[in-house]
């Protein structure tokens, strides 16, 4: 089963990388872009076949290692 963890900064946390990309896009003529937030996506293949257990384990992985839950939110997708 494929497990996807989408991790992004919480609202209100400054995102200097997003600001830099927004500025660069504006400089390149993409003025329609109002804001940019940068995150990360982690894709894992797991041997678990029970979707509930796979999601619980992925959430535990995010809580313990993959996300800094003080400043980041995450969501889990299963495919």
Image (cartoon, rainbow, N blue to C red):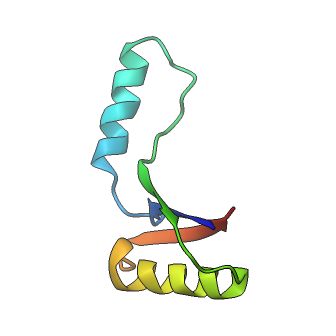
Residue 9's x, y, as percent?
A: 42, 62
Name the residue located 41 percent from the left edge and 48 percent from the top edge. Answer: 38
Name the residue located 51 percent from the left edge and 19 percent from the top edge. Answer: 31
User: Which residue appears farthest toward the top when viewing the image?
Assistant: 29
Residue 18's x, y, as percent?
A: 37, 42
Name the residue located 68 percent from the left edge and 79 percent from the top edge. Answer: 49
Say left or right for 21 vs 41.
left
Say left or right for 14 vs 11.
left
> In this view of the protein, which residue sits in the foreground, 74 or 48?
48
> In this view of the protein, which residue sits in the foreground, 20 or 38?
38
Do we see residue 6 in this rendering? no
Question: Which image quarter holds the C terminus?
Answer: bottom right
The answer to whether 7 is drawn above or below residue 47 in the figure is above
Residue 14's x, y, as percent?
A: 33, 57
Do we see residue 27 in this rendering? yes
Question: Which image quarter holds the N terminus?
Answer: bottom right
Name the residue located 36 percent from the left edge and 15 percent from the top edge. Answer: 27
Residue 41's x, y, as percent?
A: 47, 55
The answer to whether 59 is drawn above or below residue 79 in the figure is below
> In this view of the protein, which residue sits in the foreground, 40 or 45?
45
Quarter-wise, where is residue 68 in the image? bottom left
Say left or right for 53 vs 63.
right
The answer to whether 17 is drawn above or below residue 41 in the figure is above
Quarter-wise, where is residue 71 in the image? bottom left
User: Which residue appears farthest toward the front when viewing the image?
Assistant: 47
Callout count: 0
């Amino acid at each position: 089963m494929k497990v996807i963890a989408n991790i992004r900064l919480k609202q209100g946390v400054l995102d200097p990388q997003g600001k830099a990309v927004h500025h660069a896009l504006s400089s390149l003529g993409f003025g329609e872009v109002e804001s940019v937030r940068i995150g990360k996506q982690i894709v894992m293949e797991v041997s678990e076949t029970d979707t509930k257990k796979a999601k619980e384990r992925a959430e535990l992985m995010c809580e313990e290692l993959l996300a800094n839950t003080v400043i980041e939110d995450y969501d889990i997708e299963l495919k």
